[in-house]
């Protein structure tokens, strides 16, 4: 990644654009969402904060190609997990 340009991901998040980090097909592209998030953090000047990562992950769920009702339930589950993580950090 040293030869790759800096990616303006934080600028996009600051402008409240609904951006996410995804994989097309992990079986073909031989990657994982975690690996792609690490790559995005390395390409972003100053890296990504925990909040940036949470926003990217939530945006990924919100923009997923998934049936609406199932996606809504999944997003609620994810939001509860994130809420618990936030509460844990505050202790």
Image (cartoon, helix red, strand yellow):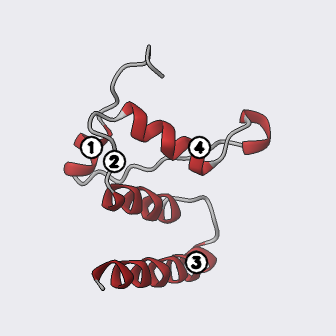
Q: Of discs 1 and 3, which sits in the foreground?
A: 1
- Marks 2 and 4 close (CB-CB < 8 Å): no
Q: Of discs 3 and 4, which sits in the foreground?
A: 4
Cα distance, mark 3 to mark 4? 22 Å
- Marks 2 and 1 close (CB-CB < 8 Å): yes
Q: Position of residue 72 (x, y in %)?
A: 53, 79
Residue ID for mark 3: 74
First of labels 4, 1 by sequence position: 1
Q: Of discs 2 and 1, which sits in the foreground?
A: 2
Per the image, label 2 sits on a secondary structure element best described as: loop
Residue ID for mark 4: 35
- Marks 3 and 2 close (CB-CB < 8 Å): no
Label 3 neighbourhood size at 10 Å, few (<14), some (14-19), many (20+)?
some
Residue ID for mark 2: 48
Q: Quadrant of residue 35?
A: top right
Query: In screen coordinates, is 48 left or right of 65?
Result: left
Residue ID for mark 1: 10
Image point (43%, 18%), residue name: 4
- Disc number for residue 61: none
Q: Position of residue 43 (x, y in %)?
A: 39, 31
């Amino acid at each position: 990644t040293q030869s790759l340009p800096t990616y303006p991901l934080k600028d996009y998040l600051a402008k409240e654009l609904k951006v996410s980090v995804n994989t097309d097909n992990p079986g073909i592209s031989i990657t994982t969402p975690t690996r792609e998030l690490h790559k995005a953090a390395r390409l972003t000047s100053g890296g990504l904060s925990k909040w940036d990562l949470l926003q990217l992950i939530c945006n990924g769920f919100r923009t997923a190609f998934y049936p609406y009702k199932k996606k809504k339930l999944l997003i609620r589950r994810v939001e509860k997990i994130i809420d618990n993580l936030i509460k844990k950090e505050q202790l």
